[in-house]
């Protein structure tokens, strides 16, 4: 397979046809029941969450309940309007946190799917404490006493991605990207020229391959040639296999160890 | 940006390379960018670097801030040895850091240490907007985390003065990860039952707002500070209209329930002292 550049991966990660959170949820889990609202302000449709079963009869692993959270982009303009292009407001992150705390209470592992251009920069978002909502998630996720697996399936951009990204394992699909902000934003800030986004993408270390080297992620899930949309079932199946195997591993260690190891994982970021 | 630099009164002064270069005011006179009054610099500094005419709180260096808050001679630095990293091998980044250090005599965008505040022991972290707009990269994240961990180890209250344009772009994703790292350290601090006071000063935005700045048990701010996650220009571009006067200012955040109290700089030390005292179990 020809070498794919970082900016080509950005395009792949953002493709309208690329599978979104709900596509993976429907493939990997059974009986997904979506739960709504942050119990405070509203229900943010750019982020979905609920309870589902995970299991694999072919491997004699019987179904067990898990909590699933995902940033949900649309596949067309209409869906994207409804989903706000996967850009969450504070109530979205607060809904995610509510469901994660609920998972902890009932001892369910948590799986999150990251796919967002970033937290929504709107007036309402600021009025309702976008910064506080993200900060709270980072702090609370770091000490949840259940296994957390985070999967970057498309575009993981900025604090909006990290807000559901503090896990025991952080994995990326082969063509997903994960970055501090979009290459366009990076180019306009550092090169004072948004049209240099391609150049920015190559320099930002945003691909799964680069981030694995930086120890920001733990695992890369391969995609078929041309991208995940060409064989959703295959990608979902490798992802499912990885998720089940990892949850079984993580369930073997004590809660204290689990939390401490998650702490150590993020504690090391930026130390060389 | 903050203070219009009037003419350099004394040429010799311009050459002087002392620690004071870290302050934005050069020359003996400055002009307040709020009320346009010409002010004698020394008088401004003797007034906590606040405009004596209109009360505008000018941005101040970490050096000056520490002097205002810590009892004289009590500040002992933590994490000075932590170096700036260059995970992206970003063109010219380390060179820029080096030049800035020479020019400003500031080592990085945060300075942390143990100190006493009216005799009360505390861990103090002070960010500095004169160094790459107080942006958080690996060094800032690591120093803040070390300060939090020190405060857990010594069972001391933690005080962080925030001022930041957000995560440091030049360190890419590693800067983003500092948000998780510092917030996780604060979770431990919280669990240990210790007090954390966060003070938001002008400006506190982006990744710092979306991590440790917003996680104080008590959150204070200086008057009229810009505080938010997204920058005002980004919001204006998104919604395609101008933001109303006072949007994302301290008073706006107080109104919306995100800060506990707005405190003028002259009252800051006393206020911190009172809050620390109030969190001690024993009666005074
Ligand atoms: Zn003034």
Image (tube, coloured by chain):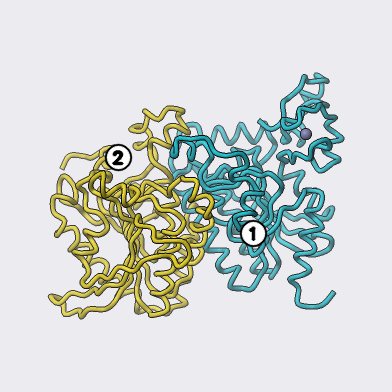
Chain colours: A yellow, B cyan
- In the picture, the disc for residue B187 is none
Q: Is residue B31 above or below residue A2?
A: above
Residue shown at 34%/53% (left/top)? A212
As rendered, which of A266 and B281 lies closer to the eye?
A: B281
- State the image coordinates of residue A61 (x, y, percent, origin top left): 20, 79
- Give the residue at mark 2: A6
- State the image coordinates of residue A76 (x, y, percent, origin top left): 23, 45
Q: Total of numbered circles in the picture? A: 2
Chain ID at mark 2: A
The quarter of the picture showing ligand 1: top right
Image quarter of residue A58: bottom left
- Give the residue at mark 1: B147
Mark 1, ligand 1, within 8 Å: the answer is no
Q: Is residue B237 above or below residue B172?
A: above
Crowding near the residue tagged with mark 2, few <14, some 14–19, many ≥20 C-alpha atoms within 10 Å: many
Using the rendered image, report if marks 1 and 2 lie on a common chain. Answer: no
A211 left or right of B226 in image: left
A251 left or right of B224 in image: left
Residues tagged 1 and 2 counted as in contact (Cβ below 8 A): no
B188 left or right of A181 in image: right
The secondary element bearing badge 1 is classed as helix
Q: Check the picture and name the quadrant holding the N terminus of chain A.
A: top left
The secondary element bearing badge 2 is classed as helix
As rendered, which of A133 and A165 lies closer to the eye?
A: A133
- State the image coordinates of residue B259 (x, y, percent, origin top left): 64, 57
Is residue B112 visible from the viewing direction of this image? no
Crowding near the residue tagged with mark 1, few <14, some 14–19, many ≥20 C-alpha atoms within 10 Å: many
Chain ID at mark 1: B
Is residue B13 visible from the viewing direction of this image? yes
Distance from Cα at disc 1 to Cα at disc 2: 37 Å
Image quarter of residue B58: top right
Residue shown at 67%/59% (left/top)? B260
């Amino acid at each position: 397979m020809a070498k794919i550049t970082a900016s080509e991966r950005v395009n792949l990660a953002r493709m309208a046809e690329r599978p979104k959170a709900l596509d993976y949820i429907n493939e990997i889990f059974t009986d997904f029941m979506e739960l709504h609202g942050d119990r405070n302000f509203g229900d943010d449709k750019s982020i979905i969450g609920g309870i589902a079963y995970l299991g694999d009869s072919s491997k004699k692993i019987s179904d067990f309940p898990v909590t699933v959270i995902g940033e949900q982009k649309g596949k067309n303009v209409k869906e994207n309007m409804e989903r706000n292009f996967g850009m969450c407001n504070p109530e979205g992150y607060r809904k995610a946190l509510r469901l994660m705390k609920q998972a902890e209470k009932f001892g369910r592992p948590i799986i999150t799917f990251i796919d967002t251009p970033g937290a929504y920069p709107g007036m309402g978002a600021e009025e309702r404490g976008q910064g506080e909502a993200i900060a709270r998630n980072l702090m609370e996720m770091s000490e949840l006493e259940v296994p957390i697996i985070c999967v970057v399936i498309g575009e993981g951009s900025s604090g909006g991605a990290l807000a559901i990204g503090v896990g025991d394992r952080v994995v990326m699909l082969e063509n997903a990207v994960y970055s501090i902000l979009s290459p366009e934003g990076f180019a306009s800030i550092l090169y004072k020229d948004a049209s240099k986004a391609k150049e920015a993408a190559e320099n930002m270390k945003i691909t799964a391959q680069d981030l694995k080297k930086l120890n920001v992620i733990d695992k890369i899930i391969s995609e078929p040639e041309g991208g995940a949309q060409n064989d959703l079932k295959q990608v979902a199946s490798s992802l499912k296999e990885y998720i089940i195997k990892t949850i079984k591993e993580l369930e073997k260690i004590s809660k204290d160890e689990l939390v401490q190891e998650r702490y150590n994982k993020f504690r090391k970021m930026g130390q060389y | 940006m903050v203070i219009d630099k009037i003419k350099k009164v004394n040429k010799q002064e311009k050459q002087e390379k002392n620690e004071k270069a870290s302050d934005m005011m050069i020359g003996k006179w400055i002009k307040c960018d709020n009320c346009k009054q010409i002010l004698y610099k020394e008088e401004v500094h003797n007034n906590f670097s606040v405009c004596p005419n209109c009360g505008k709180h000018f941005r101040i260096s970490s050096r000056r801030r520490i002097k205002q808050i810590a009892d004289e001679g009590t500040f002992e630095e933590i994490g000075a040895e932590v170096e700036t990293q260059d995970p992206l091998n970003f063109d010219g980044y380390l060179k820029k850091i080096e030049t800035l250090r020479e020019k400003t005599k500031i080592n990085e965008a945060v300075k942390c240490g143990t100190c006493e505040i009216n005799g009360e022991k505390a861990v103090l972290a002070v960010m500095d907007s004169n160094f790459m707009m107080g942006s958080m990269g690996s060094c800032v994240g690591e120093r803040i985390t070390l300060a939090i961990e020190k405060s857990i180890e010594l069972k001391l209250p933690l005080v962080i003065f925030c001022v930041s344009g957000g995560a440091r772009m030049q360190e890419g994703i590693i800067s983003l990860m500092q948000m998780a790292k510092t917030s996780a350290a604060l979770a431990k601090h919280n669990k240990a039952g210790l007090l954390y006071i966060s003070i938001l000063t002008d400006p506190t935005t982006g990744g710092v707002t979306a991590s440790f700045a917003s996680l104080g048990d008590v959150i204070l701010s200086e008057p009229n500070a810009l505080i938010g996650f997204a920058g005002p220009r980004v919001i204006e571009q998104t919604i395609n209209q101008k933001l109303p006067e006072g949007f994302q200012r301290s008073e706006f955040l107080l109104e919306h329930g995100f800060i506990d109290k707005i405190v003028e700089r002259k009252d800051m030390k006393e206020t911190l002292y009172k809050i620390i005292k109030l969190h001690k179990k024993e009666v005074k």
